[in-house]
Image: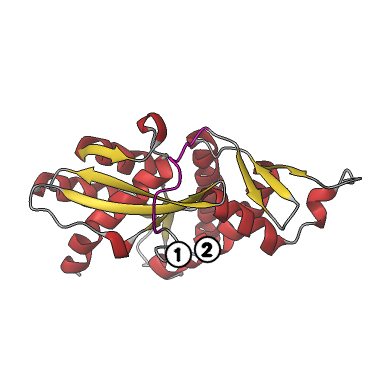
């Protein structure tokens, strides 16, 4: 994304409906992806992960959960795409079941174009006084950059992040044998977002300073990733 995001085209508006060109004539209208809908997605994904863990007690927890998240995210993203793709403009005689005629790949492409954020590694700014984390996305089909200016992380912040991530998997021994245990997964996205808020100085290029919760999680995981990796 950094190759195309050569300049700021628009300010990202989390509450806005987006219009994305599909080809020279057709335009897809995409609904906003609210924090409430994102948390519903996370809850659905968490439920599926816990159903899997309940029936697969011998699984390698870290690897299995990661793989399952990817697999179930694909299925849930298709449902999400059907919900958020609102209409197609400049298409005559659109049938009632038109969404079923769009391929899975095209649906996900539209969803990612409208709502996917990435860390913009090529545009990092170094500062001793603050942490700058650049992100990038597309808005109405145009590349947009943002910057998240955070205060330097403290030992207390690192401890808090480690505590938050430690709560994502809960292992309960139910018997004497190693396999006699239950494992549950708990999303900590809201706690990570709270940590982001506590460290934030300014989020740049978001309309009304409204940063999506999923972007806060992306940024805070990135900020503390080096700390976690150093401890391994």
Residue 40 figure quarter: top right
- Which x, y percent locates residue 81? 65, 49
**Is residue 225 or residue 6 the one in the foreground?**
6
Q: Residues within 10 Å of mark 1 (few under 14, many from 20)?
A: few
Q: Secondary structure at mark 1?
A: helix
Kindly identify which residue carries mark 1.
Answer: 66
Quadrant of the rendering where the C terminus is positioned: bottom left
- For the magenta stretch, what is the residue range? 6-15
Residue 99 is marked as none
Quadrant of the rendering where the N terminus is positioned: bottom left
- Which x, y percent locates residue 180? 42, 62
Give the distance between the C-alpha atoms of the residues marked 1 and 2, in whole angstroms.
6 Å
Magenta highlight: main SS:
loop
**Is residue 105 or residue 154 the one in the foreground?**
105
**Is residue 141 or residue 193 the one in the foreground?**
141
Would residue 8 be counted in the magenta stretch? yes
Q: Residue at x 24, y 54 (%)?
A: 223
Dot 1 and dot 2 residues touching (CB under 8 Å): yes
**Is residue 106 or residue 166 the one in the foreground?**
106
Kindly identify which residue carries mark 2.
Answer: 70
Q: Residue at x 27, y 36 (%)?
A: 197
Q: Is residue 81 left or right of residue 208?
A: right
Would residue 190 be counted in the magenta stretch? no
Q: Is residue 205 left or right of residue 30?
A: left
Q: Residue at x 30, y 47 (%)?
A: 147
Q: Residues within 10 Å of mark 2 (few under 14, many from 20)?
A: few
Q: Secondary structure at mark 2?
A: helix
The answer to whether residue 152 of the structure is visible from this angle is: yes
Q: Is residue 101 left or right of residue 153?
A: right
């Amino acid at each position: 994304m950094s190759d195309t995001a050569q300049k700021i085209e628009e300010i990202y508006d989390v509450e806005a409906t987006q219009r994305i060109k599909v080809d020279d004539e057709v335009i897809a209208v995409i609904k906003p992806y609210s924090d409430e809908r994102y948390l519903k997605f996370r809850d659905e994904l968490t439920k599926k992960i816990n159903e899997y863990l309940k029936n697969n007690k011998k699984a390698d927890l870290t690897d299995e959960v990661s793989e399952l998240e990817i697999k179930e995210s694909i299925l849930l993203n298709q449902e999400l795409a059907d919900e958020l793709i609102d209409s197609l403009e400049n298409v005559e005689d659109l049938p009632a079941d038109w969404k079923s005629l769009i391929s899975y790949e095209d649906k996900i492409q539209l969803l990612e174009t409208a709502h996917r954020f990435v860390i913009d590694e090529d545009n990092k700014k170094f500062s001793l006084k603050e942490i700058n984390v650049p992100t990038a996305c597309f808005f109405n089909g145009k590349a947009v950059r943002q910057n998240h200016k955070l205060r330097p992380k403290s030992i207390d912040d690192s401890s808090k992040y480690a505590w938050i991530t430690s709560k994502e998997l809960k292992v309960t021994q139910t018997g004497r044998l190693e396999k006699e245990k239950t494992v549950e997964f708990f999303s900590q996205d809201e706690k990570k977002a709270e940590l982001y808020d506590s460290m934030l100085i300014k989020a740049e290029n978001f309309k009304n300073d409204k940063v999506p919760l999923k972007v806060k999680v992306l940024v805070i995981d990135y900020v503390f990733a080096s700390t976690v990796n150093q401890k391994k």
